[in-house]
Image: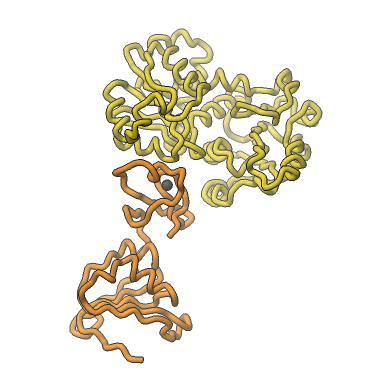
Chain colours: A yellow, B orange
Amino acid sequence: MKHLLSITDFTVEEISEVIAVAEDISKNIYSYSEKCKNKILATLFFEPSTRTRLSFESAMLSLGGKVLGFSDANSSSSSKGESVSDTIKVVSCYSDIIAMRHPKEGAPLVASMKSSVPIINAGDGGHNHPTQTLTDLLTIKTEKGRLDNLTVGFCGDLKFGRTVHSLIQALARQKGIKLVLISPDELKIPDYVKTDVMDKYGMEYIETTSLEKAMPELDVLYMTRVQQERFFNEDDYLRLRDSYILTVDKLSSAKKDMCILHPLPRVNEIAVDVDDDPRACYFKQVQNGRYVRMALIMKLLGVK
Amino acid sequence: MNIDAIKNGIVIDHIKAGKGMEIYNFLNLGELDCTVALIKNVSSKKTGKKDIIKIDASIDLNFEVLGYIAPEVTVNVIKNGETVQKVRPEPPKFLKNVIKCKNPRCITSVEQGIDQCFKLTDSGVYRCIYCESKAKN
Ligand SMILES: [Zn+2]
C-alpha cells in the first residue's frame, strides 16, 4: 500500500505516470466519471482549508466516488482529545482512501503507520504539501511541454515557503534544471535545502535580490507571498515588499512564453492586471489541481 | 592523581574534554551499583585534554546512544586487567526513543504513544522522521 506524504515518496517515474494520467483527464474528464464508483474518500481536515478540501472532494466526485469527512477539528472527535492514531484507525474502516490536513508537522506519517488505507497528505503545518507540488508540476508540464531543461525562477519568501522547497525537491531529479533564486537576504533559501537537495543532485543555481535582472532568462516564474511577520521591523518589510511584487512593467523583459505560477491565495505579490497576461497560469493551476488529485487517487487506489 | 586500574570492566577513553558528564548522564551511569569514575581534563598527547570514564563491571553499554553523542570515543573492554577489545562506536542510522523532538509544531509534541525517531541524513545530521527538524540535545 502506497501513501503520499512528501513529494519524495514518489519516484520520477511515478510522478510522470500521475502527470500523464492527469493530462489525459484534462482532455476527456467524462471518460473517468466511473473510475472510482463505490469508493469512498475521507477528507479529514483537522485544520480548515476550504480550497484544498473542495479540490479533493471535486476530484473524487468527478471519478464517480463518494466523500465524507470533517472540515475542522472542532467538529471532530480530536477536539475531545482523540489522537491522530485513533481517529485514523476508525476512519480507515469507513473509507478506501484518506486525504488529511493537520496543523502539526508529521501527523500524516503517524496516520500512515496506523492506517489500513492509503493516506494523502493535504498539508501538515509548514512541513509538506505534496499535492500542491503535483499541481505545480502538471501546470509546468502542460504549459512548457516538459519538466526538464528549464530555467525556473523562485521569487519572494524562499526561507519559509514549503511549496518552494518541495517543488525544488521534485525538480532536482529532472535533467537540466537551472534555478534562479530571487529573494531579499532575510528570506534566502535555507542552507539545508542547498546541501541536502540542490548540491546533492548537482543542480545549477544562482541567487539574486533582483527580480528585474533575473526576468529575461526565466522559462517559469514561481511567485510566493512575502509576509510582514517574517520581518523584524515594518520599514524593512515596506522597503522590500515592492521589489518582489510582479507587475505588468516588470514582465516587459520576460520571455513571451514564460509561465507564471503561484500557490494561491495571493495577497498583493502579483498585481491584478497581470491576470490578463497570457503568461499568468495561477488560475489554470486550480483546474490542474483537480485533475492531478483525480490521477493521484486513482494511482493510490490501484485503479487503471 | 591516580585512579586504580580496573580488572574487569569498561573504559571509555578519548572523550572530548568537558563532555564526560553528558555521556555519564545519557548512559544513566549514575544508576549503576559498581564503582564508576569520571575523570576530567586528563592530559592527552593527541588532543591536549580529554575526559575518561571507568566502569568497574562488565555491563552492556548502549552503543547506539554512545555512537550518537560521542562517536569519537574509544571503548576498551577490560578482562583480567587486560584490554581484550577496542571498539569505536558508529553513529547509528536510526535512533529510537533516545532523544526527543524539540519542535513545538511537531506531532510528537501532542500525540500520545508514538516512538521518538530520528534518522541520520546524508549531510550527517539527525532529523526527526515526523517533522524533519534537526535533533538538539
Ligand atoms: Zn519532530
- Residue sticking out furthest to the top: A30
Image quadrant occupied by the N terminus of chain A: top left
- Residue sticking out furthest to the bottom: B1
Quarter of the image for residue A234 reads top right
Q: Residue at x 70, y 34 (%)?
A: A218
User: In the picture shown, does residue B117 fall above or below B6?
Assistant: above
Query: Is residue A222 or residue A20 the one in the foreground?
Result: A222
Q: Which residue is drawn at 31% across and 27% down?
A: A117
Query: Is residue A151 or residue B18 the one in the foreground?
Result: B18
- State left or right for residue A106 relative to residue A232: left
Report whether residue A174 is seen: no
- State left or right for residue B83 relative to residue A69: left
Count the labels in the image: 0
Q: Residue at x 45, y 85 (%)?
A: B45
Q: Residue A147: x and y, percent?
A: 57, 31
- State left or right for residue A15 relative to residue A219: left
Image quadrant occupied by the C terminus of chain A: top left
Query: Is residue A292 or residue B115 the one in the foreground?
Result: B115
Report whether residue B25 is seen: yes
Q: Residue A225: x and y, percent?
A: 65, 34
User: In the picture shown, does residue A304 fall above or below A28?
Assistant: below
Q: Which residue is drawn at 43% across and 33% down?
A: A102
Quarter of the image for residue B87 reads bottom left
Q: Residue B119: x and y, percent?
A: 39, 51
- Residue sticking out furthest to the left: B80
Quarter of the image for residue B88 reads bottom left
Q: Residue B95: x and y, percent?
A: 34, 54
